[in-house]
Amino acid sequence: MTQKHKPHIRDDHRATCLTCMDGRIQIPVITWIRRSSKVKYVDIISEPGMDGILNRPHAQMDAILTGIKISTTVNHSSHIFVVGHFDCRGNPATYQKHKAQIIFGTKKIKKLFPSYPLTGLWVNSKWQVKKIIELL
Ligand SMILES: [Zn+2]
């Protein structure tokens, strides 16, 4: 087989992560996603209090949706994650409220990108990552 007929092999298996800008959660979240999804890279789409923003009207999500489209169609991401976390200063709320927002946001993105598996995650007070919802 000649070089040009070799199948294209990607060495950059990726996931897409919709998460808060908070620097305390980035490494735990990326590490967890890389381990659980066997991806090499995690495309980060961040906003202060992302889980809260995903519960707002569509008009306020344009930049986020553009990011997801690039990550999935151009970067070939295979899995989308939605993250909320303890002590979120961009979206101060109880755990129960965050949990409801993560579930709602995960379902909302799944409706817009139905061919991708979606997982909602929570980062707790010990900076441990916990699965809240999975829509495969
Ligand atoms: Zn936050």
Image (cartoon, helix red, strand yellow):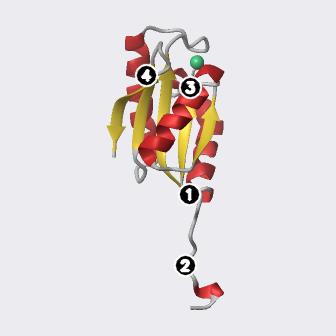
Helix, strand or loop under label 3: helix
Residue on which the image places disc 4:
101
Residue reaching furthest bottom?
A: 1
Which-is-in-front pick, marks 4 and 2? 2
Real-space Cα distance between discs 4 and 2? 41 Å
**Looking at the image, is mark 3 or mark 1 earlier in the sequence?**
3
**Looking at the image, is mark 4 or mark 3 earlier in the sequence?**
3
Left or right: where 134 falls relative to 7: left
Which-is-in-front pick, marks 2 and 1? 2
Q: Is residue 97 above or below residue 54?
A: above
Left or right: where 62 falls relative to 52: right
Type of the residue with mark 4: Gln
Instruction: Using a 10 Å C-alpha cutoff, classify the residue at mark 4 as few (fewer than 14 neighbours), some (14 to 19) or many (20 or more).
Output: many
- Residue found at x 34% / y 38%: 134
For residue 7, the mark is 2
Residue on which the image places disc 1:
76
Mark 3 and ligand 1: say if the CB distance to the nearest ligand atom is below 8 Å: yes
